[in-house]
Image (cartoon, grey):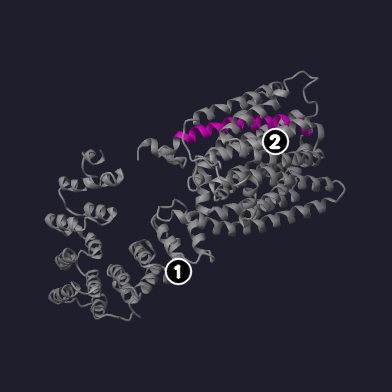
């Protein structure tokens, strides 16, 4: 790894992703400046004119507008590509700051309309940028890249709040120009990504728009996710309400309120950027998507409780941080990753419906609730807020359950490949009782390595695993804690499959004597050779080499015509010094051509003479490429003779060829 790659790794990025990640980062940076300018300018105008009491009116009207425009945006994606929609939306929403520069007779006079216009612009541009960005991302890479992109949005907010803090009076006069200029700058990253190829998510199928909507709403995962977003929108209105009550009481003038909002935004956005750049992707991978998904509703309940018990400036900051910051570095990344399980031709519709229709419907409901609170005691408001929080948690738990089921079917077609998903996600999938056939899935997941916490989970399903999976598990059992390794070995050594018992004996032979005796305490041998092997492993007295050699020769002769005898031979080989059996194993491999013997001899290929290694390679030249590669990396063969692989050079990846010549300086011939 060079210095550049190490630098990108700090941000959880890979070098091949930089070509599209950097333009997308600047897209979010400029949009962050656009959103922050509009928010501070219009919100300070609105709160100074209407106060907290005006929020119920705003939420109701804004919710209705968003709800109706959500249908338009969803259909908008059907008739325009994401690239064309990108340009059209920016042009349309740049008209909002542009309208403030018109003569007084044409400019909107009521701050309510500007506040609603800014909210709509932020809402739909943010939703569209997410759809646009996910063209370049996969389900696995989105966990790393998407938090990094959203950090760009917060960084833009930090830049604009520094300007506001340093010259608040000038900002009030020139905010509309900054707002408009930032909107125009958002076009720059679009042209930077114009030539990058990606897999289009636009549907070209014969199904109508209504058919696609019906398909989405027939999904339990989609319906529950929509309900969760609906409740979340209501919960967010309550945090805005409590924040406005406290903030307007502490800062009655527009300028003081604008300075407070800008300073708060600077500090918290700085924290959020640091979280998104360095922490969020790691949190998501460590906790798993379902656990991370629960953080937001749980935090809502705790923060509302704190605001009720102590309605101070700190409570206002906590409410604002939950709504404006925590939603960025936890809720939105997790929510969009969960939505990515839908097929490519449905994911944009799913996001647009949830963000453009369901969320505004929740805002309408929240606005109506807030309008009722004016005539009700404060205690009713508090109780209702807590009930909403508990409902939010309950629906999120159901959403997590459905996600665990859905992700299995999403990843199932990728099983032959290495999956780059966190172990915590893997454990959640394996634990799912609705997934009956776990063997192939577990085996594919084992390809990326095992961590200690996975062994207890997989032990529960040992009996249902295939031969291939059991052998794979035994080959990496050395990484498990001793007590878990012992438990797996007890099961494996009594397995009905003879080849599984071979690998079990191989592991047991490398354990301390006390651990061997513990594993074999209740072991019942099934073949004559196994009694001899058990004695070798548990008796302190060593057997004479002549006795072992005689048994090996006998098994070798039987193995020429009997498959089970060949397995017995390998059982004995697995527990003795390789120097004693290598010649017998070499003769058997050459005589039978059985790939089982080739795989076993590969483990000790360094003990073969060069001429023997060449003959073995030629005898098994039709074996899978990865087996041949592993054999040649272990065998002592002259580098020039490794050119035998030239016949396969167009099929082998360059990394494999490089590994064959890791100690050499000239292997370019293999890659040309």
In the drawing, does residue 104 fall left or right of residue 74? right
Magenta part of the chain: 19-47
In the drawing, does residue 633 fall left or right of residue 132? left
Magenta: main secondary structure equals helix
Most distant residue in the front direction:
206
Quadrant in which the C terminus appears: top left
Relative to 479, say whether 54 is above or below: above
Most distant residue in the top direction:
103
Quadrant in which the N terminus appears: top left
Q: Residues within 10 Å of mark 2 (few under 14, many from 20)?
A: some
Q: CA distance from mark 1 to mark 2?
A: 51 Å
Give the image location of residue 233, x and y in percent.
Answer: 70, 47
Q: Residues within 10 Å of mark 1 (few under 14, many from 20)?
A: some
Q: Is residue 268 visible?
A: no
Q: Residue 486: name its quadrant.
A: bottom left
For residue 313: magenta?
A: no
The answer to which of 63 and 551 lies nearer the viewer is: 63
Marks counted in the figure total: 2
Give the image location of residue 214, x and y in percent.
Answer: 65, 51
Q: Residue at x 80, y 42 (%)?
A: 56
Which callout, 1 or 2, points at the residue further toward the start of the chain? 2
In the drawing, does residue 611 fall left or right of residue 568? left
Name the residue beneath numbered marker 2. Answer: 120
Name the residue beneath numbered marker 1. Answer: 461
Give the image location of residue 661, x and y in percent.
Answer: 23, 45
**Mark 2 residue element:** helix
């Amino acid at each position: 790894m060079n210095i550049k790659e190490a630098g990108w790794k700090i941000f959880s990025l890979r070098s091949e992703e930089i070509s599209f990640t950097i333009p997308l980062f600047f897209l979010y940076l400029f949009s962050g400046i656009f959103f922050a300018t509009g928010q501070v300018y219009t919100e300070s105008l609105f709160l100074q004119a209407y106060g907290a009491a005006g929020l119920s009116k705003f939420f109701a009207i804004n919710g209705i507008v968003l709800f109706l425009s959500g249908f338009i945006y969803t259909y908008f994606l059907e008739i325009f590509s994401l690239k064309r929609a990108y340009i059209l939306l920016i042009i349309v929403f740049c008209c909002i700051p542009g309208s403030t520069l018109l003569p007084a007779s044409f400019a909107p006079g009521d701050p309510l309309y500007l506040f609603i216009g800014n909210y709509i612009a932020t809402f739909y541009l943010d939703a569209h940028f997410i759809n646009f960005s996910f063209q370049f991302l996969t389900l696995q890479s989105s966990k790393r890249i998407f938090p990094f992109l959203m950090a760009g949005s917060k960084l833009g907010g930090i830049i604009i709040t520094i300007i506001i803090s340093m010259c608040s009076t000038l900002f009030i006069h020139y905010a509309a120009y900054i707002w408009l200029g930032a909107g125009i700058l958002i076009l720059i990253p679009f042209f930077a990504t114009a030539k990058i190829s990606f897999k289009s998510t636009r549907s070209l199928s014969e199904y109508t728009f209504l058919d696609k909507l019906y398909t989405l709403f027939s999904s339990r995962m989609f319906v529950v996710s929509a309900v969760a977003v609906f409740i979340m929108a209501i919960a967010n209105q309550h945090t805005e309400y409590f924040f406005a009550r406290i903030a307007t009481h502490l800062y009655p003038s527009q300028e003081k309120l604008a300075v407070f909002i800008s300073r708060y935004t600077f500090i918290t956005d700085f924290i959020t950027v640091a979280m998104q750049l360095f922490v969020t992707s790691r949190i998501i991978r460590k906790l798993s998507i379902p656990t991370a998904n629960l953080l937001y509703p749980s935090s809502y309940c705790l923060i509302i409780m704190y605001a009720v018990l102590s309605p101070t400036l700190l409570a206002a900051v906590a409410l604002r941080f939950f709504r404006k910051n925590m939603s960025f570095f936890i809720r939105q990344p997790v929510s969009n990753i969960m939505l990515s399980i839908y097929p490519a031709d449905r994911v944009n519709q799913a996001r647009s419906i949830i963000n453009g229709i369901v969320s505004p419907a929740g805002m309408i409901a929240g606005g109506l609730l807030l309008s009722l609170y004016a005539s009700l005691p404060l205690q009713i408001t508090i109780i209702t807020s807590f009930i909403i929080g508990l409902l939010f948690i309950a629906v999120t738990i159901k959403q997590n359950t459905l996600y665990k089921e859905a992700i299995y079917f999403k990843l199932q077609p990728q099983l032959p490949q290495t999956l780059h998903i966190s172990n915590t996600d893997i454990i959640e999938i394996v634990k799912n009782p609705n997934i009956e056939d776990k063997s192939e899935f577990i085996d594919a997941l084992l390809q990326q390595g095992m961590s200690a916490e996975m062994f207890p989970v997989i032990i529960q399903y040992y009996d249902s695993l295939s031969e291939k999976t059991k052998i794979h598990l035994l080959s990496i059992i050395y990484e498990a804690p001793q007590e878990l390794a012992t438990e797996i070995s007890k099961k494996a050594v009594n397995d009905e499959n003879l080849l599984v018992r071979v690998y079990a004996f191989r592991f047991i032979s490398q354990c301390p004597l006390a651990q061997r005796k513990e594993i074999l305490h209740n072991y019942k041998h099934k073949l004559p050779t196994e009694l001899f092997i058990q004695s070798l492993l548990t008796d302190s007295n060593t057997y004479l080499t002549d006795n072992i050699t005689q048994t090996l020769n006998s098994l070798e002769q039987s193995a020429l015509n009997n498959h089970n005898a060949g397995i017995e031979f390998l059982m004995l080989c697995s527990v003795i010094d390789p120097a004693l059996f290598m010649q017998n194993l070499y003769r058997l491999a050459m005589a039978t051509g059985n790939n089982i013997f080739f795989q076993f001899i590969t483990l000790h290929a360094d003990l073969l003479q060069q001429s023997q290694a060449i003959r073995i390679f030629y005898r098994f030249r039709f074996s899978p490429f990865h087996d041949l590669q592993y054999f040649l990396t272990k065998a002592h063969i002259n580098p020039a003779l490794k050119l035998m692989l030239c016949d396969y050079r167009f099929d082998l990846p360059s990394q494999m060829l490089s590994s064959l010549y890791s100690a050499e300086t000239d292997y370019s011939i293999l890659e040309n």
